[in-house]
Image (cartoon, rainbow, N blue to C red):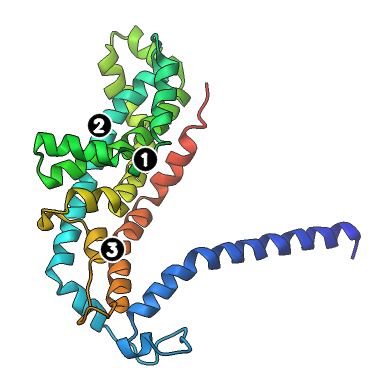
Amino acid sequence: MSPRARARIARRTLFWLLVAVILVYLLLPFYWAVVSALKTEAELIRTPASYWPQRVSFANFESVLGNAAFVRGVLNSAVVASAATLLSLAVGAFAGYALGQLRFRGKTPSLYGILAMTMFPQVAVLAGLYAVIRLLAMPSLLSVTLSYLLFTLPFTVWVLQAFFRGLPASLLQAAQVDGATMMQSFWHVLLPLTAPALVTTGLLAFVKAWNEYLFALTFTVIDRSARTVPVAIALFSGESAYQQPFGEIMAAAVLVTIPLVVLVFAFQRRIVQGLTAGAVKE
C-alpha cells in the first residue's frame, strides 16, 4: 500500500472517529434521560448505576402524564412559544426585508443595534422588564410571550435580513417594472422565496421559547396557572421534602423533547433549504 493511500485511510479513520465521538457526546444525555425514565425509584438510587433498566417501568411516564401542573405547563408552553414565534416571524420578515433589500439612512447602525441586543444576558434586563410589566399590570401569559421577543425577535431579524440580502436584486427590480408596489413585491415575490428561511428561523425561535426558563419563572411566580413546562418540571416534588423525583423529571424531559424532534423531522427538508438559502447570489 502506497504512503498516499495509507494517509487517506488514516484521515478517513480519524474523521469517522471524530464523528463517533460527537454523536456519543450529543446523544448520551438523551439516552441517559430515557434510561432513567424507564427505571424504578429503587433502581435509580442503586449503586453502581446500570446502563439499562433491569425491569422496564412506565410508572414515571404515567405519573407525569397524570400531573395536572405538567399538562397545563405543556399547553402554556405551546401557546406562548407559538405566539412568540409567529410575532417574531411577522415583525422579523418586514424588518429583514427592509434591512436586506432597501436602502435608507441608519441601516448599518440599526443592524449593529439588533446584533448588540443579542449579546445582553437575560438577567441584565430582568429587573427592569419585571418592573415595566408590573406597572402595566399585564396578564402572566401575555407578559411571558412579549418578554420572549427580547431574544427571538433580534435573532429572527438578523437571520432573515441575511436571507433577503442574498436574494437577487433583479427580482425586486423586475416586480417594480411590472408596476408592483413595495408591499406587493415583498408579499408576492420575495416572501414566497424565503419560505425555507422562515421555517428554519421559526423553528429555532420556537425551540428557544419552548426551553426558556428564567423569564417564565419570574413572570409566573404569582400566577401558578400560567407556568410553562420548564418551570413545572423544575418544581416537581417528591413524596417527602428530602426526595428528588429524578425518574419523573427525566420522563418529563423526554416527553417535552419529543415535539421538538417531531418538528425537526417533519421540516428537515425545509430546514436544509433554509440553511443554504442565504448562499443565493446574483
Q: Give amino acid for label 2.
A: Ala
**Image point 13% across, 39% down: which residue?**
134
Q: Nearer the viewer, mark 2 or mark 3?
A: 3
Q: Are marks 1 and 3 in contact (CB under 8 Å)?
A: no
Q: Position of residue 110 (x, y in %)?
A: 39, 20
Q: Secondary structure at mark 1?
A: helix
Q: Give amino acid for label 3.
A: Val
Residue picked out by circle 2: 90
Q: Position of residue 148 (x, y in %)?
A: 26, 42
**Image point 33% across, 88% down: which residue?**
56
Of the pair 72 and 113, the residue shown nearer to us: 113
Q: Quadrant of residue 183?
A: top left
Decide: is 109 above or below 226: above
**Image point 14% across, 47% down: which residue?**
141
Residue 56: assigned label:
none
Q: Position of residue 92 (x, y in %)?
A: 31, 30
Residue picked out by circle 3: 256
C-alpha distance separating marks 1 and 3:
20 Å
Of the pair 44 and 191, the residue shown nearer to us: 44
Of the pair 11 and 119, the residue shown nearer to us: 119
Q: Secondary structure at mark 3?
A: helix
Sequence-wise first label, 2 or 1: 2
Q: Secondary structure at mark 2?
A: helix
Residue 201: assigned label:
1
Q: Quadrant of residue 167?
A: top left
Q: Give amino acid for label 1.
A: Thr
User: Can the viewer see residue 86 in this picture?
Assistant: no
